[in-house]
Each structure stands twice: as structure tokens, then as C-alpha cells.
Amino acid sequence: MRYVPSLDVYLDGAPGSEGRARSAARCFLGELAGLDRVRLSPQTRQDAVLVVSELVCNACRHAPGPCRLTMVVVDEGVEIAVEDTSSELLHPAGRPGPSGHGLFVVATIGHRVHAARTATGKIVETVVPNHRG
């Protein structure tokens, strides 16, 4: 059986949720740093925490109620998904401005940013590529 490291965190959407998500992501990725079978570069881990922060911040800002963070280590890097209670699909700005830069950052760092409606809101997913070298 293949080992697939993953993290699943439910957040209430209240102030502090973004910080709790960042802490959970850092802890998860930090634990993986010591495993021989999971090789994520320090840059990949840093990028993944930034993407988590931006996605959870958007969920807390634009959707009422709770959200769910999921991280899974895949062959090409770290798949990150945030599910929230708003069905409004946000799109990355063409260039960063005073607001709306979060999805621009996610789209710049991640591959295949995808947003889809769910029965209870939406989910936004991306893959942070592993910078090996």
C-alpha cells in the first residue's frame, strides 16, 4: 500500500481561522520534511503555506460560516483545496491591485487552479509544484 500524506482541517470561519490554517499547514509540511519517502523542497513548503493562507483568507472573507482545508502530497507537489459555503466563483485578477490579489498569488504559484460549485458552496483547488533541485 502506498503512503499518501494528507491533512484535513475544519475551520469555523471566525477571526483567527487563517492563522490556524497556516499553523496546521506548517506543522503538516514540517513533519514531512523528516521523511525520506516524501521529498518536498523548502520552497515548495513555503509556497504551499502561502497558498493555504490566501485560499483560507478568501473563504473567510467571502463566505459565511465554516470552511475546510485539505492538503495531499501528490507526485508533482502538494494539492491544496479549500471548500466554503459561498457558491460565488471568484476569479484571479489579471494583475494585483488593492484587493483581489489573493487568487492572483494562488494562480501564479499553483498549477491548474480550479473552482467548482458544490452542494453546499464551492471548492477551490490547485497544485503547488515541487521545486526540486
Image (cartoon, grey):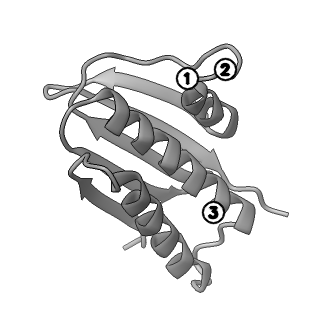
- Which of disc 3 and disc 2 is earlier in sequence? 3
Q: Which mark is residue 100?
A: 1
The amino acid on which the numbered mark 3 sits, given as a three-letter code, is Arg
Q: Residue at x 42, y 34 (%)?
A: 58
Q: Residue at x 85, y 64 (%)?
A: 133
Up/down of 60 relative to 46, above or below: above
| Residue sitting farthest toward the left | 119
- Which of disc 3 and disc 1 is earlier in sequence? 3
The image shows residue 22 at horizontal and vertical percentages of 47, 60
Q: Compute the Cα span from label 2 to label 1.
A: 7 Å
Do the CB atoms of the residues marked 2 and 1 lie less than 8 Å apart? yes
Q: Which mark is residue 30?
A: none
For disc 3, the marked residue is 45
SS for tag 2? loop
Quadrant where the N terminus is found in the figure: bottom left
Q: Which mark is residue 97?
A: 2
Up/down of 62 relative to 19, above or below: above
SS for tag 1? loop
The image shows residue 55 at horizontal and vertical percentages of 45, 40
Q: Is residue 22 left or right of residue 59?
A: right
Residue 34's image quarter? bottom right
Question: Which of the two discs, 1 and 3, sits closer to the camera?
Answer: 1
Up/down of 78 relative to 55, above or below: below
Q: Compute the Cα span from label 1 to label 3.
A: 23 Å
The amino acid on which the numbered mark 1 sits, given as a three-letter code, is Gly
The image shows residue 86 at horizontal and vertical percentages of 24, 24
